Image (cartoon, rainbow, N blue to C red):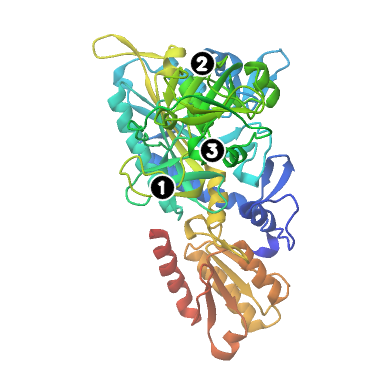
């Protein structure tokens, strides 16, 4: 493509709206332009990168035996009501009425639609297994869209759905998708980890997220230094603490703590450490207050709490809601004589003689013990993991790193097929629900994640498999017939060799061309200029590390083909 004929509007300055690296560079490099909050138009350069990801995804999904289809973005509310998700999904589901007052929504995901297709057309175990996928625009009405394509409202996603006769078959389908995803992200040139994850609004019994490792990632992931264990913070397990069985239980004591509401202030006043104090945190779970007990230096992991309670929505109560529920002011809440349901983190169950609030302003209690002084409704792993915790799999050291979710695979089981009465006849003529799996990739997010992981102060550094163009030619001698002719010939030769090439034929200063080439992140830059007329060579520079060498014009095509082939194989 000739640069002079391209819609490639690069920017010298970073737009004020851009917060993260990928958003800044995508706007500056002419990838996209904002239409409205969280919604973008993909310009040709950006769309070309997205198409690269789509091609890799299609090849690997087809290789894994999946078939492509396309489902509508507009979905009837009645389908979602069959599964109960129309009310449960929350405000991210954009609901609307058509001219006939029929309720519909814009699809954030397609479990209901695909299940409806299968229940209509597949009726026998002989039709199974089957895996269907699409690459399609989704819409989720994020309350605070940000970071460009990292968390927009409209985005491109690949979603696939498998249907099997039993759990064993579903396990095989899950394994195929797990391996396919590893191949996809490896081929995209990304550094990633597959981590255990919570299933969230999609549901299901088990899931993995595929996380691209990047300092600017939205999610913190837990990675073991010694084994393959990896999980996101919501799912990361904490090994149970050993109980202090040899410690004698001391007499309960009420202590005046005037004005001491915060953990550190209470600890300093009572001459204890935070690991000797238990916090009482009030949450509202589906409208009902519940108190959660965690050690003073720990934080509640709300997703673990939600899953333990079987709740749809869990949020920390504000001071007024906490007071209304307990009759005690925040900072002095405690479990002794509590008026509301109590649940405890497993670490609390192993503690003895700890300090808690006395449910009375300016007072705390010392030497409190679970079982003697109060009871709880349940004990579970309810806290966030910390860097000091051992790996739950092998006991080794863990590390906390940042990641960007680009893919998520789920074992759905029969929750959708049962609620929608999607049944098949097994070999014995018995009706059974389909056993399902769900597998998503944020196609547009993959591009953003690749840029977050591959950039420098000058711009993007595209992995070769995702680059919109593999080579950029800079013609620095538009008024020199020999330079101009050599640049045109090279452009033609590279195209004939099947190399994707951007030919910068603009009448711009060399400095501007060099800056734009670095900003765009095209893997190889060939400069046709004075070195050709003086020494009979062209300058080839690799964007990833700046390595530069001079090559004779007749050797350029073969040299670039060899390099690109090698890069694509890595």
- The answer to whether residue 7 of the structure is visible from this angle is no
Q: Looking at the image, is mark 3 or mark 1 earlier in the sequence?
A: 3
Q: Tell me the mark number nearer the camera, choosing from 1 and 2.
A: 1
Q: Name the secondary structure under disc 1.
A: strand
Tell me which residue sits at (72%, 39%) in the image: 37
Residue 385 placement (x, y as % from top left):
46, 40
Residue 283 placement (x, y as % from top left):
59, 24
Tell me which residue sits at (67%, 43%) in the image: 146
Tell me which residue sits at (64%, 40%) in the image: 152
Q: CA distance from mark 3 to mark 2?
A: 22 Å
Q: Is residue 391 above or below residue 98?
A: below
Q: How many marks are shown on the rendered structure?
A: 3
Q: Name the secondary structure under disc 2.
A: helix
Q: Is residue 220 above or below residue 252?
A: below
Closest to the observer, 269 or 508: 269
Question: Label 1: which residue?
Answer: 223
Q: Give the position of the C terminus as an image quadrant.
A: bottom left
Circle 2: is it few (<14), some (14-19), or many (20+) Cα within 10 Å? some
Question: Label 3: which residue?
Answer: 157
In the image: residue 485, left or right of residue 559: right
Q: Is residue 39 above or below residue 85?
A: below
């Amino acid at each position: 493509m000739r640069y002079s004929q391209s819609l490639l509007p690069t920017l010298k300055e970073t737009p004020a709206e851009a917060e993260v690296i990928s958003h800044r560079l995508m706007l500056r490099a002419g990838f996209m332009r904002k239409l409205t909050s969280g919604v973008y138009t993909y310009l040709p350069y950006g769309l070309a990168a997205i198409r690269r990801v789509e091609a890799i995804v299609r090849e690997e999904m087809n290789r894994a035996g999946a078939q492509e289809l396309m489902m509508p973005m507009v979905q009837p509310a009645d389908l979602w009501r069959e599964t109960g998700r129309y009310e449960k999904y929350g405000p991210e589901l954009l609901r609307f009425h058509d001219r006939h007052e029929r309720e519909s929504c814009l699809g954030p995901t397609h479990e209901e639609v695909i299940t409806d297709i299968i229940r209509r057309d597949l009726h026998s175990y002989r039709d199974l297994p089957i895996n269907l996928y699409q690459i399609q625009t989704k819409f989720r009405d994020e309350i605070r869209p940000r970071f460009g394509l990292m968390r927009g409202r409209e985005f491109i996603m690949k979603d696939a759905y498998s249907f099997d006769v039993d759990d064993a078959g579903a396990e095989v389908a899950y394994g195929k998708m797990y391996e396919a995803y590893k191949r996809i992200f490896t081929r995209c040139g990304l550094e990633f980890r597959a981590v255990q994850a919570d299933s969230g609004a999609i549901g299901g019994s088990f899931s993995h997220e595929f996380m691209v490792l990047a300092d600017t990632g939205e999610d913190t992931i837990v990675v073991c230094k010694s084994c393959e264990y990896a999980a996101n913070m919501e799912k990361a397990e904490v090994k149970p603490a050993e109980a202090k069985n040899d410690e004698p239980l001391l007499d309960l004591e009420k202590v005046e703590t005037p004005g001491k509401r915060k953990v550190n202030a209470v600890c300093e006043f009572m001459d204890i450490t935070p690991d000797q104090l238990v916090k009482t945190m009030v949450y509202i779970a589906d409208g009902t207050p519940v108190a959660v007990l965690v050690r003073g230096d720990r934080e509640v992991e709300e997703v673990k709490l939600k899953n333990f309670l079987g709740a749809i929505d869990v949020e920390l109560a504000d001071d007024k809601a906490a007071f209304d529920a307990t009759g005690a002011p925040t900072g002095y809440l405690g479990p002794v004589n509590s008026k509301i349901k109590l649940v405890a983190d497993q670490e609390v169950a192993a503690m003895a003689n700890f300090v808690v609030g006395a449910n009375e302003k300016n007072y705390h209690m010392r030497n409190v013990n679970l079982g003697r002084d109060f009871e709880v409704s349940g004990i579970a792993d309810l806290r966030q993991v910390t860097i000091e915790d051992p790996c739950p799999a092998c006991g080794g050291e863990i590390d906390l790193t940042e990641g960007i979710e680009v893919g998520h695979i789920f074992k759905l089981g029969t929750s959708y097929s049962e609620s929608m009465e999607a049944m098949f006849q097994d070999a014995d003529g018995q009706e059974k629900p389909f056993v399902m799996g769900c597998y998503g990739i944020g196609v547009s997010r993959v591009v953003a994640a690749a840029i977050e992981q591959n950039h420098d102060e000058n711009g993007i550094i595209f992995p070769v498999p995702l680059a919109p163009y593999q080579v950029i030619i800079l013609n620095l001698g538009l008024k020199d017939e020999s330079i101009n002719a050599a640049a045109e010939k090279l452009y033609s030769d590279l195209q004939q060799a099947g190399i994707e090439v951007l030919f910068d034929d603009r009448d711009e200063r060399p400095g501007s061309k060099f800056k734009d080439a670095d900003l765009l992140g095209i893997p190889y830059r060939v400069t046709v200029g004075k070195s050709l007329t003086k020494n009979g060579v062209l300058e080839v520079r690799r964007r990833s590390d700046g390595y530069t060498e001079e090559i004779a014009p007749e050797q350029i095509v073969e040299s670039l083909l060899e390099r690109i082939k090698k890069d694509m194989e890595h």
